Image (cartoon, grey):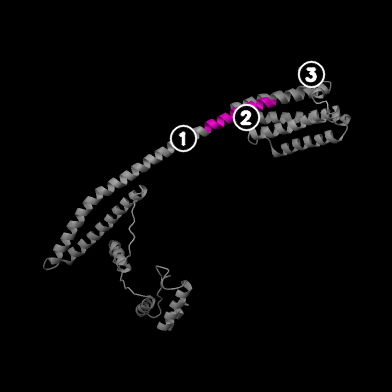
Amino acid sequence: MWTSLFPQISWFALFRSEYLTLCMACVLILLYINSFFNGLLHKLFMRIMVGGSAVYALIILFLRPLVFTGFLQYYEMGLFAGILYIVVRLAMAIRSCTTEQYILLAGLFVFFYGTVEDSLYYQALWHHTPFGGNGAGTGIMVCVFVQMLALFLRTQRDIYEARKSQQELTLQNSLLDKTNKMKTEFLGNISHELKTPLTIVANYTELARLYAERKEPKDDYIIRNMRLVSSETERIALMVSQLLDVVRIEDANMQYNLTKTNIKVLIENTINSYFPVLNKNHNTIKMLVSDDLPDAVKTAYSLTPKGMACILSPAASSYNVYRDFEEKGQHFKQLVRDYGQDAANTIR
């Protein structure tokens, strides 16, 4: 048949190609089984089978037909041993097979049967075979068709699982959006609900403090406690305001008003905000404001006892005053040397 289809190709070339097709088909089927069943076959077995098929293919290409046909029975014996190994491995994994894997197993069974039938036929052990000595070729054709069917079913299953995962992801995103909206509404509602009573508490606390200050004689205990209550109320009010800011940020409605700020006022407000925490442990903070670095070093040196160290921790880079941090550091060292050798030794 092949000679009539390709008259320009010699009979010997077609004869070799038929044997080469068997080698290539065996290798491809092994690789396909190993990938379809996710590493079912051991690496050593794969190397032996692929290496044996490659050696036999070289024999077919470079030796005479009488020689490579003589080697065919040994190659088929190796294939028969490999088939037994694959059958055992498949029997161990067949309990958890999918539909397409069962279909592939049916095609492999036909191929394995054809290979064994050819081996017995060419060794004169079985004369009247169903495929008449062409079992391997028929098995390859059936196996290829079954592989196409199995791949189609596997692709359909992958598409179905992908769509199902996408639907689940869409549902989860919808639930997350709904939960996020509920959280935003809750923060907004609780912020407004807390803001009204806090305002009332703050107003009455301020009135009580003013009344205590004007009353004669002054009651320092009441004044101090009213100041503590007022400070706590302001702190909670600030937290409520921050909750409202969070809601605005999530709704993309946050508006920023950038203005210049007096650093002294900012520090004083910060200290007042933490007054309840500091007062609880009877701690106090004394703030001294300097206009520049020389004044800050002079003040620190005058207040630091001899033998003690004063740490300078800048809150900004001061690029509007110094070229870089090295220039600022050199200036600081020079100021320390100017105001006392003891301080210079401590820093070094």
Q: Where's residue 283, x and y in %?
A: 30, 67
Q: Which residue is drawn at the image coordinates 42% and 80% (left, top)?
A: 335
Q: Are the residues tagged 1 and 3 within 8 Å (C-beta)?
A: no
Answer with the quarter of the image where residue 342 lies.
bottom left
Q: Which residue is drawn at the image coordinates 54% and 32% (left, top)?
A: 159
In three-dimensional space, the C-alpha distance between marks 1 and 3, rounded to whole angstroms, equals 54 Å
In three-dimensional space, the C-alpha distance between marks 3 and 2, rounded to whole angstroms, equals 30 Å
Looking at the rendered structure, the kind of residue marked 2 is Leu
Helix, strand, or loop for circle 3? loop
User: To which residue does mark 3 refer?
Assistant: 132
Question: Which of the labelled discs sits on residue 151, or is there none?
Answer: 2
Helix, strand, or loop for circle 2? helix
Span highlighted in magenta in the image:
143-161
In three-dimensional space, the C-alpha distance between marks 1 and 2, rounded to whole angstroms, equals 25 Å
Q: Which residue is drawn at the image coordinates 59% and 27% (left, top)?
A: 153
Residue 94 in sight here: no
Q: Earlier along the polypeptide chain: callout 1 or callout 2?
A: 2
Q: Nearer the viewer, mark 3 or mark 2?
A: 2
Q: Earlier along the polypeptide chain: callout 3 or callout 2?
A: 3
Looking at the rendered structure, the kind of residue marked 1 is Glu
Q: Where's residue 219, x and y in %?
A: 15, 66
**Residue at the far front in the pictured view:** 8
Q: Where's residue 175, x and y in %?
A: 40, 38
Q: Between 121 and 185, which is closer to the camera in this rendering?
A: 185
Answer with the quarter of the image where residue 142 lies.
top right
Q: Earlier along the polypeptide chain: callout 1 or callout 3?
A: 3
User: To which residue does mark 1 refer?
Assistant: 168
Looking at the rendered structure, the kind of residue marked 3 is Gly
